[in-house]
Amino acid sequence: MNFRYPATVLVLCSALFLSLSPGQTQEYKPFITREYLRLAIYGGDIDTVEYTMRLRQEKFLTGELNSDNMRWTFSDFTKTDPRVYAFVDDWLQAYPNSPYAHIARAWNYFTAGWAVRGTRFANRTHADAFAQHYFLHAKASEHARRAYQLAPKLVPASDALLRLANTADIGIDHEVLIKRIMRDTPNYGSVYRALNNTHTGYGGTSARAWDICDTYAPLVPSADEITVIGCKIDAAIEYHWKTHRDWATSKLNTLEDDRLLGQRRWAAAYGHYVKPDARKILAEYFDLEDTINVKFAEQYDQRWGNLPNVALATPKVLERARAHARKELQYDPYNHWLIGLLERRFQKVKSDKNGETSEFLPDAPTRAERAGYLRRKLGAVDVHLSSIKVAASEMKAVKL
């Protein structure tokens, strides 16, 4: 790696690492936080990161951490930072049989593959972009399969296989995979990701989605009828809204279970939840300090923003989202979604007898800032081309 933190940071990381033996887990708590884990990654401290991942997997297996804790642990490897890619290069060289290094690389390539393809419809995506997308996902699958072979109970590894099932050969039947996962590490997050395979654009069906929910949602710890219904609502929202809108809308407007609050917020934002508290549940959501869903806020303002005594939601949510984007761009410098948040300008249109006037938020991006965001987008091309070159020189496929 070319990038290194100052020596004082490396001393801090190494001192904390070397002071521990496998039995001394209490002293290791600082590395549970994202800041300290990032410190080790960007400091090039491979041993500390490897040990941290082992420790967290042990804690997961003993029940001290849950599946979402493990997903968070590897989230920095889905970023677009070349320094992280370089770190994983070094990590794989130092620990060639580490499931943690392999799954970190899998998520590198998974992210790069979607960045190269983009999110447009297939008929608006260039053939070369598709070819590179599928190539990177094939390489991601190799690493994910290796990680899963080495550690079948590593949730980020099984997650990667579920997410890659539509775009790569994952080397295992989807039904066999989800059955193993729900036997070894039963959790709702895996069921939710298995629904990805029911996407109609890849040949999936709603019948398959319903079968996944009926068969595997009941295996989630503490599952009940609402768990299964919630799974089907998720399937409808994500993949099968055209065919199951009426069913899902009926459930969301009649069931009052708090576990469906997230889906109700979505339905309220898009006009499918029509009970009297629709505006209230969204307004309360926008008051939460970690809410950065600008699309929901814009939908809210379109429906209720012109009512007397109703404050617009978009300005405060967008301001919060921009603050989040500025912070995360340090670690995800070529993320188009983050760049898009910073590029956006909130425009409020006022109508009166003199016509319409527009008003922008005070912190709208300057021309210089917009030019900087464009340079980042262009720079992303070089980053993803580099990942393709690295992938092309890598290992042959590993069979499960």
Image: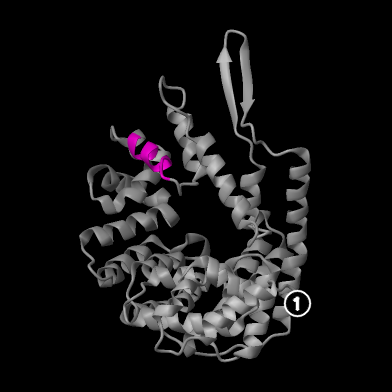
Residue lying at 63% horizontally and 19% vertically, measured from the top left: 357
Q: Is residue 166 visible?
A: no
Where in the figure is residue 181, as x and y percent of width and height?
Answer: 37, 79
Residue 281: say if magenta: yes
Instruction: Specify the principal SS of the magenta part.
Output: helix
Quadrant the N terminus occupies: bottom right
Residue drawn 64% across the image and 40% down it: 344
Q: Is residue 138 above or below residue 151?
A: above
* In the image, residue 129 above or below residue 361: below
Q: Is residue 106 visible?
A: yes
Indicate the position of residue 333 as horizontal and vertical percent values: 68, 59
* Residue 307 location, quadrant: top left
94 or 250, which lies in front? 94
Give percent across and percent down for residue 324: 56, 51
Residue in the image at 77% along x and 59% along y = 379
Front in this rendered view, residue 122 or 390: 390
Q: Which residue does the numbered mark 1 point to in the structure image?
A: 389
Q: Is residue 196 magenta?
A: no
Please state which of residues 11 and 292 is positioned toward the viewer in this rendering. 11
Could you say which quadrant of the image residue 227 lies in? bottom left
- Quadrant in the picture for residue 59: bottom left
Extent of the magenta region: 280-288
Dot 1: within a 10 Å radius of its alpha carbon, few (fewer than 14), some, or many (20 or more) residues?
few
Give the left or right position of residue 294, taking residue 280 as reference: right
Which element carries disc 1, helix, strand or loop? helix
Q: Amino acid at mark 1?
A: Lys
